[in-house]
Amino acid sequence: MPCVLLNLCEYDTQKLVKIKSVKLGSLKWTLNGVILMFICIMLLWNKGYQEYDPVVSSVTTKVKGVAKINIPDIGEVVWDVVDHSGISQGKNSFFVATNVIVTQNQKQGNCPEVPPYGKLCRTDKDCEKGFSDQYSHGVQTGACVKFDVMKKTCEVSTWCPIENKKRPRPALLASAENFTVMIKNNIRFPAFNYIRLISLQTCAYSVSQKAPCLAIFIIPTNHIHSCICFRRNILPEMKDTDLKGCIYNPYTNPYCPIFRLGDIVSEAKENFEDMAVEGGAIGIQINWDCDLNRIFHSCLPKYTFRRLDEKESNKTLYPGFNFRFARYSTVSGVEQRTLFKIYGIRFDVMVFGKVRHESNIGTSFHFGEIVRYTKRSLCPSQAGKFSIIQLIIYIGSTLSYYALTTVFLDWLIGTSCYSKEAKQNYSERKFESVQDREECFLCVSFVDEDKLRVVKKSRKKTLQQTKALSLHQRKNDLASMRTLISVMHCGPSRGLPVQNGQSGGLSRNTDTPLLEKPQSGSQAWCQCGCCVPAATLHEQLCCRLGKGRCITSSPIFSTLILNPSVLETALFYVDPLAELHEGAQLRHGAYSQFIRWRFGDSTPRDAVPVIPSCCVGRIRAEYPSPDDKYSGPRLHQTTPPQAEFNAQ
């Protein structure tokens, strides 16, 4: 019982529909082949079968350059590396001064505040003693003093004279564009660790290979040596003479680690002279895309440059980059200083990268004597193996692409490329509809129409007037055979009344005239003139769509639906041991026989078959209820129509 309640003993699977079509089959395999080709190409292009690891790096820089500048009120001064690049700006960055404002011989004292930071005043009452804010150069003394011929400002206690100069234009150190910087970048990938436990001969073989540069440390312990490899942007084949003469160029020398500052700013699409006036920030991006596999081995840096700050000074508050520092001295026992406001360019070095490698099999080692080789070397990858886990993950993630074939073919079948009958037949076989009890679909069969109609129950219109939702062909092969067997066994009907001058046999009179509607008591929705009054809208249904003969006037109706022998044979066909002792059984059997005859073995969309009012009235007249009470139709499908009848 717990197994049944929890659905633990059940298995659900999908229902597949096989369409035998050369056109669809060829298209399916063509699309699957294209998808497979796309998956394989992307697998090789993106190296989806390999493991990845983010880069861990360290950056050091060394700026070189000397400039001779003419500072106002001071004269010509030579600035070397200590002057223009000596102040550290944090990790992975360096700074180069490009412009400067110098205020000499500042001493502690009282002096007028400089507008616009200072408050304009007329008398001492306008100044507040001890007041200062973030924009003040000092603390107010409470005195209002003369700033120039036209203005007075509050006096402050600070370093006097206060800085009151505008930044020079053009920049004093515009020649800094010819300075150079060497960027040293060491990287490693911790997941792979660049460590292999190998023999000394293997490591020596790696050192001798003319391959891309990886530095190697050899740690000997018990005849087993750990080959610890790491990467840097200064390639091992570069000699000291090469570094002294090389300057980075993205086309002719893309791996040189020495950069000219003017070239860096130019590669960032900026003008060095304009940027040097206010300063700014430039990003130097080093991208490592390493493949450490044996066949596709490569691990070289790629440099790109971009500006990081907003360059439009008229659109930005506090544009550029600047800071202040001072040099202090003592003259005649009085401390004084020279204040420098430095404008310059800050260069931030950003390292990105990923590595692809075959799976590791060992990473432990013992520390011992370390020997460093500076030749061109390659950390061996003979110990690696293919990463089957990454391949399985990639294949699993790409299998969903094959669903595109099914989606496309289903869409194609639903378009105008196929006939309406083919689309409807495919939909009926692929999708099984289950109707909601509150949304009832009814099935109607007219004698003057070859197809079955599926309609939705209406609360305002009669069933005769309700528009069809869809039209379907009858599926009545089995029903036709049952009907033929019944007729062959029972023969002509006996004792049945004659309608329209016809006997109860199967002889047909094609000259039978059209039955006219009765002039009195006729139903507005009736087309055959034989319908009986109906109490509900869904019972107001005629056997015809247009005017004409009633189906009850057909000889086959009398033989197949009303003949007691045929009905008994049909009932015994379903239940061989049935006991027939009530007229209601024959009436219900007649209902069921009519449904098999007109609707077939099943109805489309699980719709409930409805018997026309004229047929219901004829059956009830032949097999009446003793109390003249009938339950009416049941508008919900509980069992297949061939096994049960939906009208009482």
Image: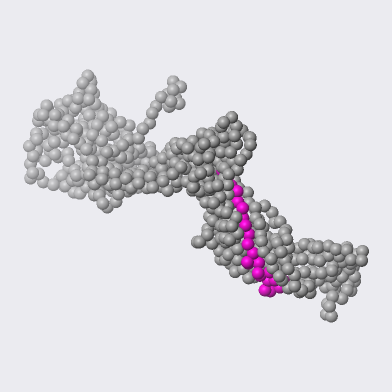
Q: Is residue 116 above or below residue 436?
A: below
Residue at the image position 58 percent from the left and 49 percent from the top = 232
Query: Which of the 4 quarters of the picture holds residue 605?
Result: top left
Is residue 621 at all visible to an observer of this figure? no
Residue in the foreground of this view, choosing between 201 and 445: 201
Q: Is residue 158 magenta?
A: no
Indicate the quadrant where residue 188 lies: top right
Q: Residue furthest bottom?
A: 149
Magenta region: which residues? 166-191
Residue 484 position in % (x across, y down)? 13, 32
Image position of 445 (left or right of 153): left
Q: Give coordinates of residue 426: x percent, y percent.
A: 27, 43
- Whether 173 is drawn above or below 441: the answer is below
> Where is residue 575 drawn, in percent x and y?
23, 22
The verdict on residue 173 being magenta is yes
- Which part of the image, by quadrant, shows the C terminus? top left
Residue 265 falls in image quadrant = bottom right
Which quadrant, please, contains the N terminus? top left
> In the image shown, does 426 or 222 lie closer to the viewer?
222
- 583 or 479: nearer the eye? 479
Label tally: 0
Q: What residue is shown at x 71% (from left), y 56% (from top)?
A: 88
- Please tell me which residue is depicted at 17% across the width and 41% down the height of the picture: 551
Decide if residue 255 is on the left or right side of residue 34: right
Residue 75 in view = yes
At 53% from the left edge and 43% from the top edge, which residue is drawn?
207
Q: Position of residue 299 (x, y in %)?
A: 51, 49
Q: Give the camera-side residue of 433 and 17.
A: 17
Task: State left or right for residue 239 relative to residue 550.
Answer: right
**Where 572 falls versus 176 (above or below)?**
above
